[in-house]
Image (spheres, helix red, strand yellow):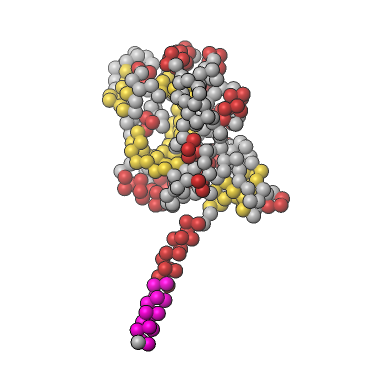
Amino acid sequence: MNNLVKLIFSLFIFFALLATCFLLPGIFAKNQLQEALFYQKLENKSVQCGLCPRRCIIPSGSRGFCGVRENQQGILYALVYAKPVTLTVGDPIEKKPLFHFFPSSLTFSIATAGCNLKCKFCQNWDISQRRPEELDYIYIEPADLITKVKASGRKIIAYTYTEPTIFYEYMLEIAKLARAQGIINIMHSNGYINEEPLRKLAKYLDAANIDLKGFTEDYYFKLSEGTLEPVLKALRVLKEERVHLEITNLILPGYNDAEEQIIAMCLWIKDNLGEDTPLHFSRFTPMYKMNALNPTPIETLERARQIALDCGLKYVYIGNVPGNPAENTYCPKCKNVIIDRTGFTVSKVNIIDGKCKFCAERISGVWD
């Protein structure tokens, strides 16, 4: 009997050691925090975050405006590192939307909780306006995510849905590994990020669609609790860094649909980013804190598109109106349809070696 007890005790010790060696390190890994990039230590263990234009001063035990960067005893931590709340295999690139970048490609899309704006019309508010502890997540380190992307057969990673710049450290590490593996990096962002971190990220970024939400400071302040100028700066930086760039402007009836604002925005895009920068006018549908506002009239979107074309922009689209002819890409010279789209589906591409099939006009974009 004593020998049996000794055997059972020995087995218990053996399996306990196995748990210590193999199980506990995994548990600890999931609880390890990632120190944030771009912050300064201040007096009394306060810190100042330098990632976005808010430059939050954060006392110990508190978080920044975004809710995902926390000061613990004078060290700023990125709480969402390796904790995506969404992993989607098979999103069409047209959904981002990117219309001039590998048409009909499928992407591996990821997002974490949080955002550094508070848009009253946010369509992903259920994850962007929540704190990390309020949502379920999948713990996955950057290297493991790359393995998952490769296993899926996708060759493009999209940082999207919420605001990717708030999971900057995670995105940057993934992007570096992806670039080394020949995987393409794209993001859909609000562009509310400071120049230094953006330039560092841009070295590994292939394409971006930036939400230019409106074209007045008043609009940004009232509807997003942000400011316009940093977004314009980010757009210029991405252009300088040769990242393929497209712009989305969600039109809200009565808020940013005035003709003079649309003209000012389009002329700014032409003068600062170039006439071949694709611009997507997107239809608003009642959402989040703006459920009482009517959807954008299609006539408003079509008028905005015509204004943009009259201002000299070559590629102007209407989004969230499936079947509208303005989903197609037209050759700016011969006016033929060179990419035929319905919703997120591409049925025909009439571009050969980056040129219009019909008249040989060079079409801005990344096609091969």
Query: Is residue 346 located in the magenta-colored stretch of the structure?
Result: no
Q: Position of residue 195 (x, y in %)?
A: 57, 36
Q: Position of residue 94 (x, y in %)?
A: 37, 30
Q: Which residues are magenta?
A: 2-16
Instruction: For the C terminus, give its image quadrant.
Output: top left
Query: Is residue 9 located in the magenta-colored stretch of the structure?
Result: yes
Q: Nearer the viewer, residue 258 or 177?
A: 258
Quarter-of-image position of residue 281: top left
Whether residue 147 appears in this view of the structure is: yes
Q: Main secondary structure of the magenta part?
A: helix
Horizontal arrangement in the rendering, residue 223 relative to residue 90 (left or right) = right
Whether residue 142 appears in this view of the structure is: no
Please give the name of the residue rendered at 61% of the width and 43% of the height, measured from the top-left corner. 64
Q: Position of residue 180 (x, y in %)?
A: 40, 47
Q: Residue furthest left?
A: 347
Please give the name of the residue rendered at 35% of the width and 22% of the height, measured from the top-left corner. 322
Q: Is residue 134 above or below residue 285?
A: below
Horizontal arrangement in the rendering, residue 9 relative to residue 338 (left or right) = right
Instruction: For the N terminus, give its image quadrant.
Output: bottom left
Please give the name of the residue rendered at 47% of the width and 43% of the height, measured from the top-left corner. 112
